[in-house]
Amino acid sequence: MKQLLYFAGQLHRYSGKILYINLIGMLFIGLLDGAAVLLLLPLIGIIGIVPSSAASIPGMHFLAFLQEMPLASALAVILCFYIALVAAQSLLQRNLSLREVRIHTGFINHVRLETYRLLLEANWSFFVRKRKSDLINALTGELGRVTNGAFLFLQLIASAAFTLIQIGLALWLSWPLTLFILGCGLLIGWLSRRYIRKSRQLGAVTVDLAQSYLAAISDHFNGMKEIKSNSLEQSRYRWLQDWSVKIERERYEFTKVRSNSQLFYKWASAVLIAVFIFAAVTLFDTQGGQMLLITLLFARLWPRFTGIQSNLEQLASSIPSFKALMELQLESKAAKERGGYKEGFGEGALPLPMQDALELKEVFFRYDRSNPEYTLHDVSLRIPMNGMTAIVGKSGAGKSTIVDMLLGLIEPERGCVAVDGKPLQPEEVLTLRRSISYVPQDSFLYHASIRDNLLSIDPGATEADMWEAMEFSSAIEFVRGLPQGLDTIIGDRGVLLSGGERQRLVLARAILRKPSILILDEATSALDSLNESKIQQALERLRGRLTIIVIAHRYTTIQNADHVIVIDGGRVVQAGDFRKLAEEQDGMFRSLLGGKQPVAM
Ligand SMILES: Nc1ncnc2c1ncn2[C@@H]1O[C@H](COP(=O)(O)OP(=O)(O)OP(=O)(O)O)[C@@H](O)[C@H]1O
């Protein structure tokens, strides 16, 4: 219920009074429907099908004048009135349906944008904890189920309100019979509660199945090369077969629950109607006109009870989706970046000015606070501006963790990140990131043209800016050689380019942003020596123009660094000039270099 109210509240805030006008409109349509039915009674009386008079039905005295009129005129009056009612009702229905579609589609977009905004504003640690496919599933499958569910909920309220009006009308006509029927209805509702419970359990299974499907299918396609090269096709196919059996079973179970509940309702109502007619005739001595009216009203009321039950079951099955999306929204809200975002994610904000150095001061950090071991232990280091600094160390030493901290993606448990000697304030983190371009080993490229990939980082870049950036990154030659040049489509994640070409393009994109700090995190480790030397030439061209931080395992990548920081077991064990460190006989750097050999560290 909490989850339902959470999204019903969002729907209320999103659509405002229009939503309620629509709901009232729906009620009004129901009333018009009821009025049209009521008209049938005097009609039947007048044409003499049943020996009843309008005056015998409470509230129908005003129609008595019809009996004074000639049959044909009375019939014409009633039928004209009936046509007018039906015409008004259908016109209203059409307008309400159109408006409802507007509200519905608008609300889906509202929830989608709101969830995506909260996710974008969440900090990096939140994403490290989450499975990517679950986030995609939330923004696709769950989103549809939740928005449909929120509407279903409101329809249910409208339907309940209309049913109440019908009940009121029935009470006014004959309260003992109505109470009797209501009691039976409530009893059937109470006996049907297990169908609602079962629907909810099946809804949870649907959420699990949808999540596991998306997770596995994304893994399969991401790893298609490994699947093909290691002949894993059969095992992956078997997985999908098993999953298909589960979803088939779950769909069947859900339909079974709904059909059983409908069956139960139908049997129960047949018994109820029989008891009702028997009681009306033998116990309550109900008059013919009243009897007919109540029968008509309840013939309309019963399908509503069944409809409410069916809506409740459907709603119960979407509760787990409500829960999943609500928890995701609340969790991402709680994980909001400490500095907070300004309007438009602070786009256009100026980069943080840095003159002297970016530093870590006595930093302690661990990913899991229950673990007594720190990943970074009393780390102090200094990255001087406009120089080239290399961070080296064995695998797992903590190099990437240091870079994540310099980027403000993770926060020190103790100590601080400092800019020009002053501790970085939470509200400066985003402006610091504006000054940095980060290039990882496996960068992301869009399935689009080279031009669009470059413009994705700076939509205002001119053609000259793009060629200049490509010249710096040693990409100019290969892009010129492509048949469509800048307009060449590079395939999904850039598969149509070689590894070296991809990285040079990513480097061009990073430079286009005109950063004051460029971070290369193992960006060249997968390249051959020819491609690596091209990136080296690019870095030489950039030297002195901006601050470069390189994390690398290769001697050749770091040999031109002005400054080297050696990390071991989460601590800084050496720092200083490349040559000086290389000469320290017992130093770790020398052992990482493997003597003087330009080999992998
Ligand atoms: N998200 C994480 N959650 C928990 N532990 C982590 C996480 N990321 C890294 N670690 C751990 O922190 C330690 C340092 O990892 P880090 O990635 O910083 O090392 P690295 O020097 O960059 O290694 P490599 O050269 O292999 O990339 C490792 O023991 C690693 O297992």
Image (cartoon, grey):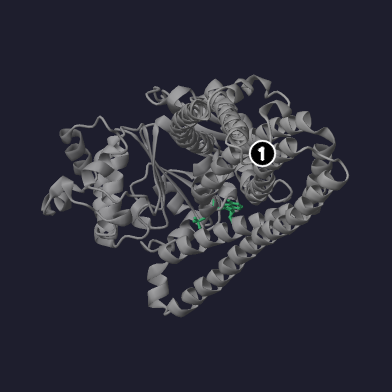
The residue identified by callout 1 is 4
Query: Is residue 419 visible to the viewer in this orientation of the structure?
Result: no
> Residue visible at 73% across and 26% down?
58
Q: Is residue 387 visible?
A: yes
Q: Decide if residue 390 is on the left or right side of residue 474.
A: right
- The residue lying at 65 percent from left, 50 percent from top is 310
Q: Quadrant of residue 293?
A: top right
**Residue extending furthest toward the right:** 283
Whole-percent x and y of residue 394?
Answer: 51, 58
Give coordinates of residue 17: x percent, y percent: 55, 21
Type of amino acid under label 1: Leu
Residue 233 lies, with reference to residue 547, above or below; the image says below
Relative depth, front residue between 187 and 563: 187
Q: Give the camera-side residue of 521 and 189.
A: 189
Splitting the image into 4 quarters, where does residue 148 fall?
top right
Above or below: residue 537 compared with residue 215:
above
Q: Residues within 10 Å of mark 1 (few under 14, many from 20)?
A: many
Q: Quadrant of the C terminus?
A: bottom left
Closest to the observer: 232 or 44?
44
Asked if residue 60 lies left or right of residue 437, the reply is right
Residue 288 drawn above or below residue 196 = above
In the image, what residue occupies the spot 26% across and 60% down? Answer: 498
Mark 1 residue element: helix
The picture places residue 261, in percent across and down from the top left corner, at: 70, 57
